[in-house]
């Protein structure tokens, strides 16, 4: 990437997607999982189309 001292090499697409601020969790968890997967695929494919060398990191959960 032009202009960056240290090029971006990794993207975490979403941090803590299980917090419930956007997805219907935990009441409708299965639907939330499918929606997150669909979202992740769109974003991952977009990043791969423009920056195929970067690593994509899967989101971590809020509770571990």
Image: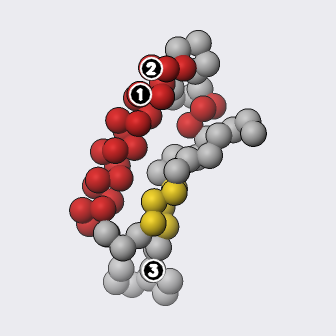
The residue sitting at the right extreme is 64
**Which numbered tag is attached to residue 34?**
1
Badge 2: residue crowd in 10 Å (few <14, some 14–19, many ≥20): some
What kind of element bears circle 1?
helix
Residues at marks 2 and 1 touching, judged by CB atoms closer than 8 Å: yes
What kind of element bears circle 3?
loop
**Which numbered tag is attached to residue 7?**
3
Q: Quadrant of residue 56?
A: bottom left
From the top left corner, tell me how far across and down residue 11 is, in percent.
Answer: 48, 61
From the top left corner, tell me how far across and down residue 31 is, in percent.
Answer: 45, 20
Counting residues from the N terminus, which is met first, the one under dot 3 or under dot 2? 3
Residue drawn at x 34%, y 44% as measured from the top left = 41
Counting residues from the N terminus, which is met first, the one under dot 3 or under dot 1? 3
Residues at marks 3 and 2 touching, judged by CB atoms closer than 8 Å: no
**Which numbered tag is attached to residue 31?**
2
Q: CA distance from mark 3 to mark 2?
A: 36 Å
Q: Is residue 61 above or below residue 43?
A: above
The quarter of the image holding the C terminus is: top right
Of badges 3 and 2, the one in the foreground is 2
Q: CA distance from mark 2 to mark 1?
A: 5 Å
């Amino acid at each position: 990437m032009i202009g960056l001292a240290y090029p971006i090499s990794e993207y975490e697409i979403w941090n803590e997607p299980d917090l419930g601020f956007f997805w219907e969790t935990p009441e409708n968890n299965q639907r939330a999982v499918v929606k997150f997967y669909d979202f992740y695929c769109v974003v991952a494919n977009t990043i791969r189309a423009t920056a195929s060398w970067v690593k994509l990191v899967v989101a971590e959960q809020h509770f571990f």
